[in-house]
Image (cartoon, grey):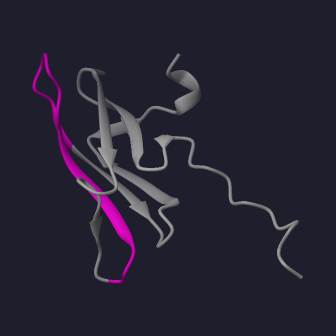
Amino acid sequence: MFNLFSKKPPANPHVKQDDPQTFRVRVRTRPHAEVVEFRFTKGAHIGIDDDGTYLFRKPVVSPQHFDRGELLVRFDRHYRVTATEGENVDFIPVSDWE
């Protein structure tokens, strides 16, 4: 009736939401396995896509070996993560951060 018992979609295992405005993601570069963390916000870093959804696209450069890659996090219109994609990087699950 009012969707009181509807299941909430599971959160993405690679993106952590710190508060309603802030997200974090960690990636590991493929050549040298360096870990790089990104913190991004709705207002400053997330842009709108052509179809009305949102995305965060960022080039990755590791600090020690200068490995290069790119990460992409896609959101729906309610800022729920729908997909994570990476070029030359692997996403680290939030459960492995600590």
Image position, residue 6 (x, y; %): 82, 68
Left or right for 77, reference 49: right
Residue 60: % across, % down: 19, 39
**Which quarter of the picture shows residue 95?**
top right
Residue toward you, 42 or 70:
42
Res 50 quadrant in image: bottom left
Left-right relation of 5 to 25:
right
The residue at 21%/49% (across/down) is: 58
In the image, is residue 66 above or below residue 8? above
Above or below residue 1? Residue 67 is above
Q: Is residue 21 magenta?
A: no
Q: Position of residue 1 (x, y in %)?
A: 89, 82
Q: Is residue 64 above or below residue 2?
A: above
| Residue 71 in the image: above or below residue 46 | above
17 vs 95, left or right, is: left
Is residue 66 one of those drawn in magenta?
yes
Place of residue 64 in the rendered image (x, y in percent of width and height, measured from the top left) = 13, 16
Q: How many labels sit on residues?
A: 0
Q: Residue at x 39, y 37 (%)?
A: 25
Give the residues drawn in magenta, as a range.
51-69
